[in-house]
Amino acid sequence: MAPVLGCVADDFTGATDLANMLVRGGLRTVQLIGVPEAGTPVPDVDAIVVALKSRTIPVADAVSDSLVALKWLQEAGASRFFFKYCSTFDSTDQGNIGPVADAFLDALGADFTIACPAFPETGRTIFKGHLFVGDQLLSDSSMRHHPLTPMTDSNLVAVLGRQTKRKVGLVQHRDVADGAEAIGERIRALREDGFGYAIVDAISDDQLYEIGEALADLPLITGGSGVALGLPNAYRRRDLVPDQPGRADAVPSVPGKALVVAGSCSSATLGQVAIWEQTRPSYNIDPLKLADGVDEVAAALAFARAHPDQPVLVYASAAPEVVKTVQQRLGREEAGAMVERALAAIAKTLVDADGVRRLVVAGGETSGAVVSALGVTGLHIGAQIDPGVPGTVTLGDRTLALALKSGNFGAPDFFEKALAQMP
């Protein structure tokens, strides 16, 4: 049976976040790392999430890569499509959210979709088109200091409007509060008035179920993982997916040594690093030493091997002022790429040579680098560890347990919790 839902995510942890949401709703879901090669069998599941590393690459490359993924999902038989981006709408005025969404609409022959990064369970809410992170406007949150996509405008109608030539409207809270029928009426009115997008308000998870019901017949949905919360039930009511016996999140257990890798500089990850360091061993990669030719990879490997009986954290996470200093010296893109290469090399060596089989990775870009270095082609999605973060087990010949965490997600003790709850 062909999957009903084909999803393209612009980073690896975002893909896992979305897959987690679909599995929570009972959809059998796999995450594929990059676009599969021609002739790769289509998994027998309800939903497929293709994870790309396209959030911060040049716009033309992001569009091209995303369209290749969309075409593969179409050929796999999917009839509904989802473009997943971060719940903090990470982007610049050039893209990549608007250009990729535009390309998907054109490829699908569609004239309208929504944009809704809301995820109230993790503190992301939208009211009158403005995105909040907890009690703060996005523009007042720590995201304003993001090293690659600083978010200094919380008005999503305006942000998306600068990325597309299509008209961007709004489905306000008053319509969302009235339920799926009212949401649908507002969408029909916007389409008749020539709008190509609508930002959709959402301040509670209950509203995401109503939004999912209203959107289930759209060929394309764009948003964070939260807006997928209502889709599984809506698809069942339309007989698009069957009720499956057993748990959608059932995965095998994976024994072996553990490693924690962190590259995110978000405030959440910095807090998690601080909690870990109170009781556990850690090694801090210094980007400036890397740039000066110091073999930080070898030093981190030696440190990990000096603690063979307990998991070690290797991290390059740093406060905004430190990140700024590094970027001023090395350049924004080179600083990030250099750290990602180092962390990925450390993880790969410890997996290949030292028996590490369980990895927790913090940060979307870091997760992408690590997963690519390990040659992972896909993931079975297991039970949720924290909102937006499930445990996963790799597809293929080498079995690894992975917890891939967006930088902004997870409780303060996430690293310990993940090691305890991973398959």
Image (cartoon, rainbow, N blue to C red):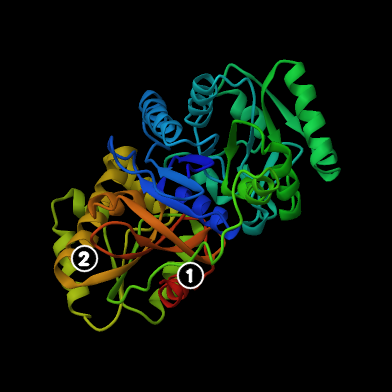
Viewed as shown, does residue 387 lie left or right of 182?
Answer: left
Q: Is residue 137 left or right of residue 180?
A: left
Question: Quick check: can you spot residue 137?
Answer: no
- Residue 414 has which mark? 1
Residues at marks 1 and 2 touching, judged by CB atoms closer than 8 Å: no
Three-letter amino acid code at the position of disc 1:
Phe
Viewer-side label of 1, 2 = 2
Q: Considering only order in the chain, which callout, 2 or 1, is on the residue closer to the N terminus?
A: 2
Which percent across, then down, holds residue 87?
A: 57, 46
Classify mark 1: residues with Cα within 10 Å, few (<14), some (14-19) or many (20+): many
**Secondary element type, mark 1:** helix
Q: Residue at x 54, y 57 (%)?
A: 23
Q: Position of residue 191 (x, y in %)?
A: 73, 21
Label 2 neighbour load within 10 Å: few <14, some 14-19, many 20+: many
On screen, 378 above or below 38? below
Judging from the image, what secondary structure is the residue with disc 2 in? Answer: helix
Q: Nearer the viewer, residue 118 or 186?
A: 186
Q: Is residue 187 visible?
A: yes
Q: Give the Cα separation between the discs numbered 1 and 2.
A: 22 Å
| Foreground pick, 38 / 126 | 38
The outermost residue toward the front is: 1
Q: Which residue is mark 2?
A: 351
Using the image, determine if residue 175 lies above or below residue 313.
above
Residue 37, quarter of picture: top left
Quarter of the image for the C terminus: give it: bottom left
Between 27 and 264, the one lying in front of the other is 27
Work out whether residue 80 or residue 347 is closer to the camera in this orientation and state it.
Answer: 80
Dot label at residue 156: none
Residue 404 lies, in percent from the top left, at 41, 58
Please tell me which residue is depicted at 77% across the width and 37% down the height of the picture: 128
On the image, the x and y values in percent for residue 222 come to: 58, 36
Q: Amino acid at mark 2?
A: Val
